[in-house]
């Protein structure tokens, strides 16, 4: 089955710096890759996603890139702010679309220091 | 706004008790999922369902069962609770595109 590896497990940056979180997946059939942000004591929330027919997607300060050949995808956060501090999870879907169950990475705890 | 509601935020149960965790979503989604979240282990899939009365085992189904009698409701059952089932349990409902909406979670402590 699918396996998702996520690195680093913890990341500390200064406010205003960029942060990059990387994930690799094992099953080349996976075609949907979302990222979730979980603030302390709250539910995970979808922040951005990408499908395998796209190489990059941006939403304001957040971007995700996908390299299908290497089977890895990354989350990029620019101009980090203290409110970006949270645990971030990447995930991959074996089927994509309406019936895919997501396999999650173990998470990255991002700390943004003011 | 999609809502996924889990009936309890905190639960304390005794070893050997039968425990029911309820999850209700209001967006007519076919797909519903149960995950448990433990420090350092991320989110692990317990069971999922793509339709009423349909269920599939995830990665860690042992000690759990599920029920999906109605489309909007997906219940997780611990047949005989054990201390190693102390965890945060998250229910999710998926959009047709595949993105999940999670419930607020139930923190279960088995003593």
Image (spheres, rainbow, N blue to C red):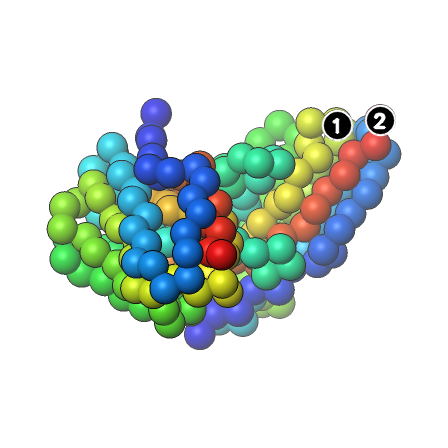
Answer above or below: position of B7 versus B51.
above
Q: Residue at x 30, y 64 (%)?
A: B79
Q: Position of residue A46 (x, y in %)?
A: 49, 39
Residue ID for mark 2: A114
Task: Give left or right: position of A73 versus B61.
Answer: right
Task: Give left or right: position of A71 versus A21.
Answer: left
Work out whether mark 1 precedes mark 2 in sequence or the reverse, and give the earlier one. 1
* Residue at disc 2, secondary structure: loop
Q: Which label number is shown at residue A40? A: none
Residue ID for mark 1: A82
Tell me the CA gap for discs 1 and 2: 6 Å
Q: Position of residue A56 (x, y in %)?
A: 58, 45
Quarter of the image where the N terminus of chain B is located: top left
Quadrant in the rendering for residue A69 = bottom right
- Given residues B11 and A95, the one toward you in this image is B11
Res. A18 in view = no
Q: Residue at x 64, y 59 (%)?
A: B40
- The chain letter for the residue carrying disc 2 is A
Task: Give left or right: position of B39 versus A104.
Answer: right
Quadrant in the rendering for residue A60 = top right
Q: Are marks 1 and 2 on the same chain?
A: yes
């Amino acid at each position: 089955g699918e396996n998702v590896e996520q690195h680093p497990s913890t990341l500390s940056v200064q406010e205003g710096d960029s942060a990059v979180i990387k994930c690799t997946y094992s099953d080349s059939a996976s075609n949907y890759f979302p990222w979730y942000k979980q603030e302390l004591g709250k539910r995970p929330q979808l922040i951005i996603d990408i499908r395998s027919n796209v190489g990059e997607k941006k939403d304001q300060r957040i971007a995700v890139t996908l390299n299908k050949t290497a089977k890895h995808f990354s989350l990029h956060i620019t101009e980090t702010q203290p409110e970006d501090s949270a645990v971030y999870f990447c995930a991959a879907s074996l089927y994509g679309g309406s019936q895919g169950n997501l396999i999650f990475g173990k998470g990255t705890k991002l700390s943004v220091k003011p | 706004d999609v809502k996924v509601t889990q009936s309890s935020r905190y639960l304390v149960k005794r070893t050997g008790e039968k425990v029911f965790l309820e999850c209700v979503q209001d967006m007519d989604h076919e797909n519903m999922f149960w995950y448990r979240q433990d420090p350092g282990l991320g989110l692990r899939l317990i069971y999922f369902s793509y339709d009423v009365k349909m269920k599939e085992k995830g990665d860690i189904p042992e000690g759990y069962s599920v029920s999906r009698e109605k489309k909007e409701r997906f219940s997780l059952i611990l047949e005989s609770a054990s201390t190693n089932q102390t965890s945060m349990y998250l229910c999710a409902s998926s959009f047709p595109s595949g993105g999940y909406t999670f419930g607020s979670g139930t923190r279960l402590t088995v003593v």
